[in-house]
């Protein structure tokens, strides 16, 4: 994305942009949001970058070391698996997956091809957030009995509109990807995240959506609880109402996660942790406690929003590309946090208490829940997941 490109320019010599790919050629032009964002930092190079409408052609023809995958959610996993099979490093935006099943397929592919994979949850590389998470994991609050997070909205079901002419520059079939080939509707891709509100393309990717800001919040919970390779064992909604019913989860050690804080009444990108010694709130660059002395040892750092907060995360990925170490938001970590979002949507739809097996990634004794489209769904012919070979 444009944001990542500008940040890369702040570290000359680390990475160089070789090529771009987008199913809508207009998105790579000078008049696009991307073009305007990079016009200054990359004015000398912008016209030299090779453009492709099909990313697979780019992977075949270019001698790349790594890729940024900033596609729509419903297209992201296929792109990442193809990149993994090409042996590339991958930086992929959140929420990473449309379903739990495709998330596990991505983990398998990345592990098989030994890729250096980083997900775009930048708080994982913010010094204060890292300190706060480690403080809680190491017992600074004693046993964590409850976690309270904001209540985020699920996706809506979209009714297709009347078809509009497909621009010459747009491969509409490719944009629809695994989802149904619906009549062309430019409102889905014009503007900020229009597609993200619909269940065919995301799990609730608007700002106040489950997979939007909620993804950051639940990732912070996973980091602080030390459950990056696991998850809760029970989940239930307060009532079978969609898309805003509060949801509760229980972890195997008894910790309860309540997702019930009203909008703008709590930590939008974090959560409140309640333990034997008091309370701690983490909210991206902010950590407070009751009693205050609990977090008196926190580092005095701050990252401005809008770009500088992401740079340490990209730098961590670049360093790992060199050292072959695992980045801070590795593929398993990202998959497990995305799974929390998917479990919220399942619980609201099903409307009853569900037991979840985080090892097998299946609901226990509930076929209806296991068939939920947030768990698995059929993909359109021609857009099946790549075979992991």
Image (cartoon, rainbow, N blue to C red):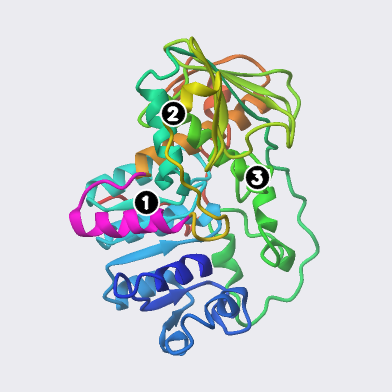
> Which residue is painted at 67% across and 48% down in the image?
207
What secondary structure predominates along the stretch shown in magenta? Answer: helix
Q: Secondary structure at mark 2?
A: helix
Mark 3 vs mark 2, foreground winner is 2
Q: Which label's residue is closer to the chain start, 2 or 1?
A: 1
Q: Which mark is residue 118?
A: 1
User: Disc 2 and disc 1: Cα gap in Å?
Assistant: 19 Å
Residue under numbered circle 3: 199
Q: Nearer the viewer, residue 48 or 379?
A: 48
User: Disc 3 and disc 2: Cα gap in Å?
Assistant: 29 Å
Residue 227 visible, this angle: no
User: Disc 1 and disc 3: Cα gap in Å?
Assistant: 25 Å
Residue under numbered circle 2: 224
> Which residue is painted at 41% across and 84% down in the image?
49
Q: Secondary structure at mark 1?
A: strand
Where's residue 160, x and y in %? 76, 56
- Tell me if residue 312 is in the magenta stretch: yes
Q: Nearer the viewer, residue 235 or 217?
A: 217
> Which residue is painted at 66% across and 42% down in the image?
209
Where's residue 114, x and y in %? 22, 50
Q: Nearer the viewer, residue 313 or 210?
A: 313
Q: Is residue 186 above or below residue 357?
A: below
């Amino acid at each position: 994305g444009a944001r990542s490109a500008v940040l890369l320019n702040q570290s000359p010599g680390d990475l160089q942009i070789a090529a771009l790919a987008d199913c809508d050629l207009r998105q790579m032009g000078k008049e696009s949001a991307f073009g305007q964002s990079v016009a200054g930092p990359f004015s000398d190079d912008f016209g030299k970058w090779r453009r492709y409408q099909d990313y697979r052609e780019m992977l075949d023809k270019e001698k790349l070391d790594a890729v940024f995958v900033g596609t729509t959610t419903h297209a992201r996993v296929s792109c990442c698996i193809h990149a993994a099979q090409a042996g590339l490093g991958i930086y992929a935006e959140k929420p990473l997956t449309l379903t739990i099943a495709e998330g596990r397929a991505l983990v398998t592919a990345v592990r098989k091809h030994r890729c250096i994979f980083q997900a775009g949850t930048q708080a994982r590389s913010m010094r204060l957030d890292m300190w706060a998470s480690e403080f809680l994991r190491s017992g600074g609050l004693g046993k964590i009995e409850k976690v309270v997070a904001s209540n985020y909205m699920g996706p809506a079901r979209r009714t297709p509109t009347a078809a509009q002419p497909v621009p010459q520059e747009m491969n509409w079939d490719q944009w629809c990807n695994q989802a149904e080939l619906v009549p062309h509707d430019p409102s889905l891709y014009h503007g900020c995240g229009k597609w993200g509100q619909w269940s065919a393309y995301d799990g609730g990717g608007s700002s106040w959506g489950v997979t939007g800001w909620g993804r950051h919040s639940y990732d912070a919970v996973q980091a602080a609880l030390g459950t990056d390779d696991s998850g809760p064992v029970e989940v239930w909604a307060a009532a079978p109402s969609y898309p805003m019913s509060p949801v509760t989860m229980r972890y195997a050690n008894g910790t309860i996660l309540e997702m019930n804080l009203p909008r703008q009444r709590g930590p939008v990108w974090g959560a409140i942790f309640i333990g034997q010694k008091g309370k701690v709130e983490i909210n991206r660059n902010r950590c407070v406690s009751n009693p205050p002395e609990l977090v008196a040892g926190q580092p005095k750092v701050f990252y401005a929003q809008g770009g500088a907060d992401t740079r340490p995360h990209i730098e961590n990925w670049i360093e790992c590309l060199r050292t072959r170490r695992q980045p801070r938001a590795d593929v398993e970590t990202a998959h497990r946090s995305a799974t929390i979002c998917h479990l919220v949507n399942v619980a609201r739809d099903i409307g009853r208490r569900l037991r979840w097996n985080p090892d097998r990634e299946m609901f226990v004794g509930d076929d209806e829940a296991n068939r939920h489209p947030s768990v698995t769904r059929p993909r359109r012919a021609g857009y099946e997941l790549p075979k992991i070979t």
